[in-house]
Amino acid sequence: MRRLRISHVESFSVFAPGARPNFAWREGLRGGPVDGRIAVLRICTDEGVAGVAVTHNRSSGVAIEDFVGRLLRDELVGADPLERERIWHRMWELDRTEEFPIWLLGLVDDALWDLAGRLYGSPTWEVIGGFRREIPAYASTSTFASLGEYLEVAKQCVELGYPAIKLHGWGDARRDAEIDAHCPWPGSLCARTAIRGGAHRRRHPLGPVAVRGGEGSRQH
């Protein structure tokens, strides 16, 4: 059986719109991405099957062009794209002297898994070995300007059926506790609230409501 071979590797940039509407994170962090250009890596084979990976880092274009032109093209052309493990270890070895940005290592792996999915005509998650078509999900919010906005969004999330909500607070433990203390469902939450490292969690009948501050959230 003839084996696939990588025939060429290319990179290019495409326009990516910023978040609409824009959003904010806690004090001290920048908000959502603005309009800009993101980089695309494309790994092609001699059978016409190609895999694509995208980085959403707005400053990644120059890094990827250098990576492809100076190193990656020579390393990958002629290789079997289904030997993902061998290629991963080769990238890891090259990193010892190149010191790639961490997202660059994953980008090659993403493109090769995408290529395999296209080759077999199946979603990549299925090729990897996944079996679930539905998984539990929780709602994760951004940081809002007022307590009222937090409570309204939390109410909407519960009404939509989410079993859990993660609210990204302001990053101030005592101020963030206001969100927890003013939950709009009296009597439905645990009476105990902990303030620890800017994070609190209380339980709603449909699941936990977490307030995430500057140091992550913990279960109480």
Image (cartoon, helix red, strand yellow):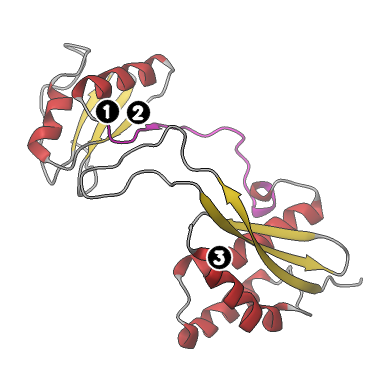
Mark 2 or mark 3: whose residue is earlier in sequence: 3
Using the rendered view, name the quadrant where residue 77 is placed.
Answer: bottom right
- Could you give the CA–CA distance between mark 2 and mark 3, rounded to whole angstroms? 37 Å
Q: Residue at x 44, y 46 (%)?
A: 34
Which three-letter amino acid code belongs to the residue tagged 3?
Gly
Q: Would you place residue 220 above or below residue 153 in this image?
A: below
Q: Is residue 153 one of those drawn in magenta?
A: no
Residue 186's label in the rendered image is: none
Task: Tell whether 191 sits left or right of 206.
Answer: left
- Residue for badge 3: 61
Q: Residue at x 77, y 60 (%)?
A: 50
- Could you give the CA–CA distance between mark 2 and mark 1, rounded to whole angstroms? 6 Å
Label 1: element kind: strand
Q: Would you place residue 63 above or below residue 147 in this image?
A: below
Q: Residue at x 70, y 84 (%)?
A: 74
Q: Main secondary structure of the magenta part?
A: loop
Which three-letter amino acid code belongs to the residue tagged 1?
Val
Label 3: element kind: helix
Label 2: element kind: loop
Give the mark toward the camera: 2 or 3: 3
Give x and y (percent) for residue 3. Answer: 86, 72
Give x and y (percent) for residue 130. Answer: 62, 46
Q: Residue at x 15, y 19 (%)?
A: 182
- Could you give the CA–CA distance between mark 3 and mark 1, rounded to whole angstroms? 39 Å
In the image shown, does 2 or 60 lie closer to the viewer? 60
Give the magenta-colored segment's residue range. 126-144
Number of numbered callouts drawn: 3
Residue 164's label in the rendered image is: 2
**Where's the N terminus, which quadrant?**
bottom right
Which three-letter amino acid code belongs to the residue tagged 2?
Ala
- Residue for badge 1: 209
Mark 2 or mark 1: whose residue is earlier in sequence: 2
